[in-house]
Image: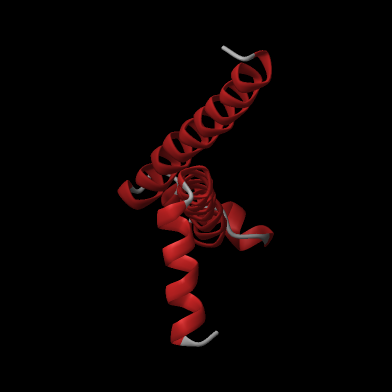
Amino acid sequence: MTDTESSSIFTLLKKNEALHELAKTGLSVLLVYSTHYGTAKLYNTICVPDGFMGYLFGFVTTASPWCKFMLELMKVTENQYSTIILVVLSRGIMKLLGI
């Protein structure tokens, strides 16, 4: 993508409010979901690794502050992701009903 193409995309987003809102929502969903997914993968790798050694070390690593933080971050991002989906669907239904 050239600079001219990317600047025209940004110009289009600025001019079209609905498209701008859709892009912001999409980026929000992508950020929240990527954070949740990445944290889940990191938690699986660090806190509860596969195999028998992971089972043994899980007693120690699961109680660590880093693992607790990752669990909390996964809970928060799960809640945010659900909220975004609910708001988007609610907004769509309200528009369909003309409210």
Depicted 45 relative to depicted 83: above or below:
below
Depicted 21 relative to depicted 42: above or below:
above
Front residue of 82 and 61: 82
Depicted 26 relative to depicted 53: above or below:
above
The image quadrant where one finds the N terminus is bottom right
Residue 95 image-quadrant placement: top right
The residue lying furthest to the front in this view is 15
Front residue of 27 and 2: 2
30 with respect to 65 (left or right): right
Residue at (56% x, 24% y) in the render: 91
- Residue 29: x and y in percent read 52, 46
Residue at (45% x, 48% y) in the render: 24
Residue at (66% x, 59% y) in the render: 52
The residue lying furthest to the bottom in this view is 2
The residue lying furthest to the left in this view is 65
Residue at (50% x, 28% y) in the render: 83
Q: Looking at the image, what colour scheme do you see? A: secondary structure
- Residue 36: x and y in percent read 51, 48
73 with respect to 79 (left or right): left
The image quadrant where one finds the C terminus is top right
Count the marks: 0
- Residue 5: x and y in percent read 51, 79
